Amino acid sequence: GEDVEQSLFLSVREGDSSVINCTYTDSSSTYLYWYKQEPGAGLQLLTYIFSNMDMKQDQRLTVLLNKKDKHLSLRIADTQTGDSAIYFCAEILYNFNKFYFGSGTKLNVKP
Amino acid sequence: NAGVTQTPKFQVLKTGQSMTLQCAQDMNHNSMYWYRQDPGMGLRLIYYSASEGTTDKGEVPNGYNVSRLNKREFSLRLESAAPSQTSVYFCASTLRQAGTEAFFGQGTRLTVV
């Protein structure tokens, strides 16, 4: 299968920026996604980026894609305690058949 | 406005028992998926159905079977539950096209004792 890798934990203080990183292996990815999972809940889409883009900004969220290094990051500006959750990156390949998810990064925001 | 609905939300089984997890979506999506989530391992694909009438194995299909009953419903069956199948199970669906988003159910927390 495909490898999508993330670090497991990140801890930041409220008001700081958070940067969550992800690497993937398949260069035929078409779209790359960030999902958020709050405790006891399913996954919700935060944002996605098409593989021919370098950057996408959506309010407090900035997604950066380095296609050469197969590296994706999610920056959350002015992180709030409500941002505490697990964040998953995911990719979908050209045939749109399957999503591949990373292991998730647990973001802990300290007051 | 239901999206993806999974039942049940919680279940405790004894080793060797069988059960079926139900999933239904009302978004007219083509593709449906079953994932399991275990701590530190993210989401692992069990089975998926790219379209009505087709099913394919994912990364961890052993011990499971699926049925794509119609376009709306995709069920996951455990014939003889084992403690290693203790997990949180998620059903998801997508349109299976460019820019598509995966919509997830709320999950089924299964414990096998």
Image (spheres, coloured by chain):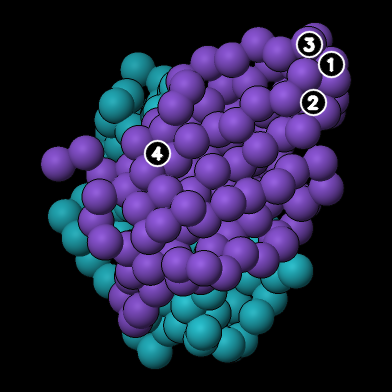
Chain colours: A cyan, B purple
Q: Secondary structure at mark 2?
A: loop
The numbered mark, 4 or 3, whose residue comes first in the sequence reads: 3
Label 1, on which residue? B15
Q: Do the residues bearing badges 1 and 2 touch, measured as CB atoms within 8 Å?
A: yes
Q: Is residue B70 above or below residue A105?
A: below
Q: Are marks 3 and 1 in contact (CB under 8 Å)?
A: yes
- Categorize mark 1 by other alpha carbons within 10 Å: few (<14), some (14-19), many (20+): some
What residue sits 54% from the left and 63% below the top?
B49
> Can you identify the residue that label 3 sits on?
B14
Which chain does the numbered disc 2 sit on?
B
Residue drawn at x 78%, y 11% as measured from the top left: B14
Rendered view: A15 above or below B48: above
Mark 4, residue position: B105
What residue sits right under mark 2 in the picture? B81
Identify the image quadrant of residue B98. Answer: bottom left
x, y (%) of residue B4?
33, 43
Residues at circles 3 and 2 in contact by the CB criterion of under 8 Å: yes
Nearest to the eye among marks 2 and 4: give it.
2
